[in-house]
Image (tube, helix red, strand yellow):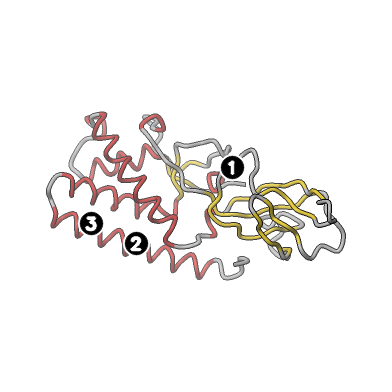
Amino acid sequence: MSWRQTQCYSLQLLVDQVASKLGIKPADLLTEEKAAIIEGINYGISTAWDHYLWPEILEVYTGSVTTDSDSTIYTSILDSGSAEMLTIEGVYKSHPGKNPLTSPYSFSQVGDRLYILDAATAPTSVYVRYWPVPPVYDTSHLSAGTTAISTATTTSSMDVVPYIFYRYLLFKAYADMLAGDGQTEKSAIASAEAEKILFQEQDKSERKNQGVHR
């Protein structure tokens, strides 16, 4: 399961709203202006991603289990759908998103392997929950006319942004565009608003997700 399968906003809507805050009609945005806004969005989402271990962006994949020559059991840290991961949150017997009461296995990470330390019997597969790397957008991910809240259905969709970061990214990209235009005072105000929003979202996340395995 991916964060893209939860409530998201379209990248197009975000770019359009940044343009509107800058006083530019979205339809009049130049290609280089779209690219500049998206550059600000990419910088912002990378900052937000690293700011806190957000339960909202956790992803889960199923890993097959192998028994090593010394009878230890492990699963690979990498799977075909995710070449890189930031942090492993846990290894589970059942899907932690569908069964929130499931307890994680104790595990040890060695290279690209996750060794399962406390399984009474070797499972055939396990569920690995992790924080993925942040998305990197470009203008090819824009889709004119896509302005509604969207629920993406595949992990390959790159035209949406997580709802928890939307307002933060709006003000962060706006601040970066103002700075690039030499409007330093307005940029500082917008940056401060973006930072306030990010901490507000963190506070809401902490209160909402107290039961998530951490």
The amino acid type, in three-letter code, at marker 2 is: Ile
Outermost front residue: 70
Q: Are marks 2 and 1 in contact (CB under 8 Å)?
A: no
Q: Is residue 172 left or right of residue 164?
A: left
Residue 115 placement (x, y as % from top left): 73, 57
Residue denoted by label 2: 197
The amino acid type, in three-letter code, at marker 1 is: Ser
Residue 152 placement (x, y as % from top left): 53, 39
- How far apart in space, not on screen, are marks 2 and 1 (Cα)? 29 Å
Report helix, strand or loop for mark 2: helix
- How far apart in space, not on screen, are marks 3 and 2 (Cα)? 11 Å
Of residues 126 and 10, the one nearer the viewer is: 126
Q: Is residue 35 above or below residue 57?
A: above
Q: Is residue 33 above or below residue 188?
A: above
- How far apart in space, not on screen, are marks 3 and 1 (Cα)? 34 Å
Dot 2: within a 10 Å radius of its alpha carbon, few (fewer than 14), some, or many (20 or more) residues?
many
Residue denoted by label 3: 190
Q: Is residue 180 left or right of residue 52?
A: left
Residue 64 placement (x, y as % from top left): 76, 46
